Amino acid sequence: MGKINLVNLPDDLLCSQILTRIPLKEAVRFSAVSRKWCKVWTRLPHLKFTDEFFNSISTNANMAEDIINKIIHMQCVNLESFELHNCDRCESSIHKWLLWISLSGVKCLHLKSSTIRMQMEVSESIFSCMTLTSLSLEYFKITEVPARFLGFSQLVSLYLDQVELSEQAFEVILKLCGCLQYLTVDACSSPSNFLIISSTLKSLALVRLDKTCLVEVNCPRLESIKVCQILELVIVNICLPVCVHLEADFHHLQHFVTVKSLRKVIYFEVYSMNGESYHSVVLLCSRIMKGAPLLKTVRINLVNSIQIFEPDEIDYFLRTVNGLLCLAGDSPKVRFSLSWGSTAK
């Protein structure tokens, strides 16, 4: 068996198959193996400065900023993705970093602050990243969108986790994302109203909204919807014309599900969070199964309801649901699972 001389590997292969699979710090060290490789790491299409990176450098934020500065300015290829954690520790440099990577045509951007107690305002320069296809923000605040913002014309996926949003900023961003298909709003400080209007959105997740607000959804191409761990005082109005994946809390599900909206549902999951009786859960299951002829999978999560179930009631519940499966359209082959806490039956 012949020997493989790593030094003779093409730079493109070295970057795509080896250096991209190891931490950035190790990739820079690896380049010292050969004089030919001394700057090969500057062609890496993905830059990740995660918590691991900051912990391995120093507790000195200035040192971390200096290193990131040098790495960003030495990049000689267009970036595919850029990920930065601990943004609040290098707040003074984020503006110029985002401007720099916007010029490199970055496609995927993930920014995360290190605390939720005092969310930092997202830098205006983020709205200069016109080539983004995926944007993820954690622990930030967006109160205003610059007037010069023309939109993320290529953005397909938007993930907002514990982001404090103004109603105006949220609506403007959605309006100017003409290709958006996937939207997740997780534990965000919600405005008085969430108005979600999109002709392209296919998947929507609304999770952990804990303030009273009105959520209006008008997305004619919506195929997947998840509405869970939301305060009962949150009013959710959703039209589901072509939904195939349905996942929601019991309280909200019973309000926005109609027979018409169930015609194309293949996957259905309900969370019973507030101790609803098994009678009400069975009634809802019956309604959904009768109206969903294409249904293939049913999952019921009884998080708190199990506390009020007697053993004979659980058996009755299971027998009743088993009978309901026969009503699930023309095909009786429906996968069903029931779980409560860490136990599934």
Image (spheres, helix red, strand yellow):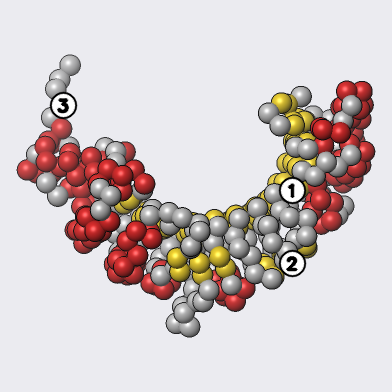
Quarter occupied by the N terminus: top left
Which element is circle 1 on? strand
* Quadrant housing residue 194: bottom right
Which residue is labeled 1 in the image?
Answer: 248
Dot placed on the residue nearer the N-terminal end, 2 or 1: 2
Above or below — where is 65 with respect to 141?
Answer: above
Residue 232 shows in the view: yes
Compared across the picture, whether 112 is left or right of 245 comes to left
21 up-or-down from 3: above or below:
below
The C terminus, quarter of image: top right
Label 3 sits on residue: 4
Query: First in sequence: mark 1 or mark 3?
Result: 3
- The picture places residue 113, in percent across and down from the top left corner, at 43, 57
Among all residues in the image, which is located at the extreme bottom?
A: 147
Please report the residue visible at 32 percent of the width from the left and 57 percent of the height from the top. Answer: 79
What amino acid is labelled 1 in the image? Answer: Ala
The local secondary structure at tag 2 comes to strand
| Image coordinates for residue 230, horizontal then vertical, percent | 71, 53
Residue under label 2: 214
194 horizontally vs 19: left or right: right
Q: Gap in Å between the C-alphas at discs 1 and 3?
A: 55 Å
Task: Tell me what residue is drawn at x 60 percent, y 54 percent.
Answer: 186
Q: Earlier in the sequence, mark 3 or mark 2?
A: 3
In the rendered structure, are the residues bearing label 2 and label 1 in contact, judged by CB atoms less than 8 Å apart? no
Amino acid carrying mark 2 in the image: Leu
Label 3 to label 2: alpha-carbon separation: 63 Å
Which is closer to the viewer, label 2 or label 1? 2
Binning the other alpha carbons within 10 Å of mark 3 as few (below 14), some (14 to 19) or many (20 upward) gives few
Residue 295 - label: none
